[in-house]
Image (tube, rainbow, N blue to C red):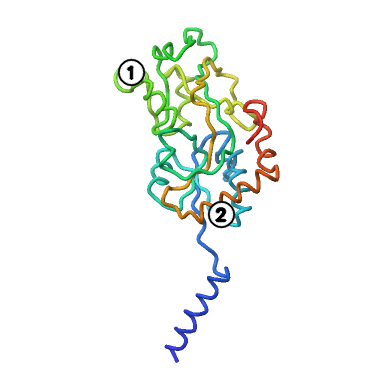
């Protein structure tokens, strides 16, 4: 009798799984605290890209769990764990073969910002910026770009590397750094209060799309399911509606 029950339970569980009665484990979704794209407020994870990712996964009919952690941690976790989704990620040549890409969610434009009133910080070219201390986040694409251009950290070098983007503006206000590379959307609705900072030089080479990415060893079937969900919200106009407040800065969504 016990043997029969075990066998019947196994058969039932197999049928239930095939019919979708057994819920799949939630898809792990990782983001950093990155106003106005992804951030935690009043206990909830919000942001323009967060809303787009939620709409995408709803359209894909996938359960998920979003968590916010420091950038270096979510980046290394996604590189190491198949089936992990991360957003928003700038698409750069260095990262192209490390992930499977879905998007773009929006276009990102970057500028070097200074504290307002710092007339001594004058930048008309990237070479001018070498005279100043620049705050960057560890393993962020802006750090990668500046290192590629010959900037370095340590001693009297220009780069000051931190673990989280929320450390940079207090450092700028305190005079511990002179410049911060930020997305222009930081000053969009629901973004930062930019009354105390101002852009001084646009890093045009860093303009890129922001994407959702999967670990490169994630199954093609799962990636395709999410990609189809994204295409549904893009074609329906849902993506453009979510990103509409950014149009003034970035232009229309893709």
Work out which quarter of the rendered image holds the N terminus and state it.
bottom left
Mark 1 crowdedness (10 Å alpha carbons): few <14, some 14-19, many ≥20: some
Q: Nearer the viewer, residue 170 or 9?
A: 9
Residue for point 55% across, 30% down: 108
Horizontal and vertical percent for residue 95?
42, 37
Q: Which mark is residue 253?
A: none
User: In the rendered structure, are the residues bearing label 1 and label 2 in contact, judged by CB atoms less than 8 Å apart?
Assistant: no
List the single residue furthest toward the top. Answer: 120
Question: Could you tell me which secondary element the residue under label 2 belongs to?
Answer: helix
Q: Is residue 7 above or below residue 224?
A: below
Disc 1 vs disc 2: which is toward the camera? 2
Horizontal and vertical percent for residue 195?
60, 20
Work out which quarter of the rendered image holds the C terminus and state it.
top right
Q: Is residue 252 above or below residue 113?
A: below
Q: Is residue 17 above or below residue 238?
A: below
Horizontal and vertical percent for residue 196?
56, 19
Q: Is residue 86 above or below residue 251?
A: below
Q: Which mark is residue 225?
A: 2
Mark 2 crowdedness (10 Å alpha carbons): few <14, some 14-19, many ≥20: some
Q: Nearer the viewer, residue 196 or 4?
A: 4
List the single residue furthest toward the bottom. Answer: 1
Q: Which residue is mark 1?
A: 157
Question: Could you tell me which secondary element the residue under label 1 belongs to?
Answer: loop
Of the image marks 1 and 2, the number of the one nearer the N terminus: 1
């Amino acid at each position: 009798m016990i043997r029969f029950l075990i066998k019947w339970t196994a058969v039932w569980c197999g049928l239930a799984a095939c019919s979708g009665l057994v819920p799949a484990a939630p898809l792990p979704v990782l983001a950093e605290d990155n106003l106005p794209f992804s951030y935690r407020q009043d206990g909830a994870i919000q942001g323009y890209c967060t809303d787009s990712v939620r709409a995408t996964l709803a359209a894909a009919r996938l359960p998920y769990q979003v968590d916010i952690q420091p950038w270096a941690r979510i980046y290394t976790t996604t590189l190491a764990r198949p089936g992990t989704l991360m957003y928003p990620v700038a698409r750069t040549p260095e990262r192209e073969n490390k992930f499977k890409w879905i998007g773009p969610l929006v276009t990102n434009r970057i500028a070097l910002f200074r504290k307002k009133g710092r007339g001594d910080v004058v930048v008309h070219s990237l070479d001018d910026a070498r005279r100043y201390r620049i705050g960057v986040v560890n393993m962020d694409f802006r750090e990668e770009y500046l290192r590629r251009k010959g900037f370095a950290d340590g001693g009297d070098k220009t780069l000051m590397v931190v673990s989280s983007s929320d450390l940079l503006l207090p450092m700028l206000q305190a005079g511990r750094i002179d410049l911060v590379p930020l997305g222009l959307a930081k000053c969009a609705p629901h973004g930062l209060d930019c009354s105390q900072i101002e852009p001084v030089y646009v890093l045009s080479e860093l303009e890129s799309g922001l994407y959702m990415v999967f670990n490169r060893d994630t199954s093609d079937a799962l990636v395709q399911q999410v990609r189809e969900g994204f295409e549904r919200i893009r074609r329906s106009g849902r993506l453009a509606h979510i990103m509409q407040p950014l149009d003034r800065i970035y232009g229309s969504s893709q």
